[in-house]
Amino acid sequence: MKKIKIIFDNNKSIVGGDKPIAEIFSANVYKLLGFIKKNKIENRVSVCLTEIFKQEGVAELQERAISKYKDAIKCGSILEGIAVGDKLIKEISEKKLIEKIKEQFDLKIKENNIEIIPLPSEMRILDLVDRAINYNPPFEKKDKGFKDSVAWISILEDAKNNQDITYILITVDTIFNRAELKKEFLTINKNSIVITSPEPIEEELDNILVLGIGLEEIGKEATENLNKDISFQRELEKKMLESVNEPIHGFMAYFPSATAVSMSYPNWKKDVVNVFFRSANVNVKNKINQDTFEVEAAVNFGLTYSGSNVVSDDSASSLIYPINVRSFNPSAITLLGEYESSRPKYIEQRFSLSFSKKNGFKILGIE
């Protein structure tokens, strides 16, 4: 019976939503856990973090919380889940706050049965030094890549001891796609390592474990249907326009208070009067029932501003969030507000949808 270890890197495992400390892990992780449970493959699939990615995640959450510590009363939701007894956030010291974040992280690891792949043994540390000196990947020029290299060596060491397990690394870091790394992995494990972004992971599992659900084909069909369904495209446009006009959503998720939002709300957003559907890519995340599936759609919209005409498709350079679910380029991501002075022409947003061949699409949420 084929078994799989799915390893998330820190960028795609730690939450980026309204309650990062209460939830710890991202929607990508929880959707995958839901898929595993729904299809009863818990004994065949392990969801993992390397120890170095875990430590990095804890440190990032601690830094994020401390930086907002003085605003904790206004930004209550960001620290939800870490109060001690009946104490208010303002009564908790910074030291106690740091300790509670670590406790919450460990609790969520235990609750969700996340496996932690340990740090490399002392012998493998010599390999790390050699990589650093020779800039062997994941090390890069300018001394980048220490944490990625520690994680990679941890994975190699684990894979050497588990020859019958297939490994999948969920990452948007392009350094891991280097051919030298995949070749190196084959020298210590008989199975090739799969390097992928999180969007198609359920489809990968369906194919590797031969579950027979046909998620990849359903995803292609859903993509084709969504790009033809004019009526539903209008629904997405309406939802997207509401989102653009709502400063709290998405890009300011770490700052739930209105006062914090007003400090960073991009000027161009207030001038957006309309959005129009351009294209979409769909990945299937789970099977809801016999005919209905939970899908994630990355939808690209054009923007129309007050006092201007509808923009044309003559330039991709103004694209905000240029994410193609099936060909993701993380280096192309642009933070909202970066084109504040020039007004972006396009914006891309992820939607959680249900899809049925019989009943079409319904919006479940916006991510």
Image (cartoon, rainbow, N blue to C red):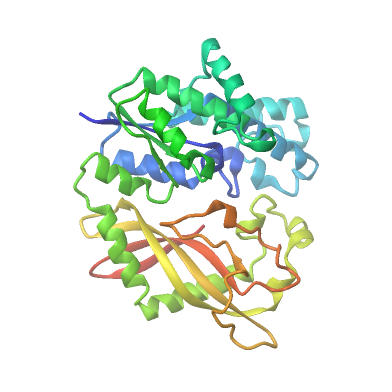
Please state if 72 lies on the left or on the right of 33 as rendered: right
Is 179 above or below relative to 48?
below
Q: Quadrant of residue 360?
A: bottom left
Please state if 268 lies on the left or on the right of 155 as rendered: right
Whether residue 7 is visible, yes or no, is no
Q: Nearer the viewer, residue 118 or 172?
A: 172
Percent of width and height locating residue 209:
24, 39
Q: Nearer the viewer, residue 26 or 209?
A: 209
Is 228 above or below relative to 138?
below
**In the picture, which quadrant includes the N terminus?**
top left
At 57% from the left and 61% from the top, the residue drawn is 321
Is 142 above or below relative to 342?
above
Q: Quadrant of residue 34?
A: top left
Is 299 above or below relative to 26?
below
Q: Total number of numbered labels?
A: 0
Percent of width and height locating residue 66:
75, 36
At 65% from the left and 35% from the top, the residue drawn is 144
At 57% from the left and 39% from the top, the residue drawn is 22
Please state if 74 lies on the left or on the right of 188 as rendered: right
Q: Nearer the viewer, residue 174 or 231?
A: 174
Percent of width and height locating residue 49:
48, 30
In the picture as drawn, the residue positioned furthest to the top comes out as: 122
Q: Nearer the viewer, residue 2 or 135?
A: 135
Percent of width and height locating residue 342:
72, 73
Whether residue 213 is visible, yes or no, is yes
At 63% from the left and 70% from the top, the residue drawn is 318
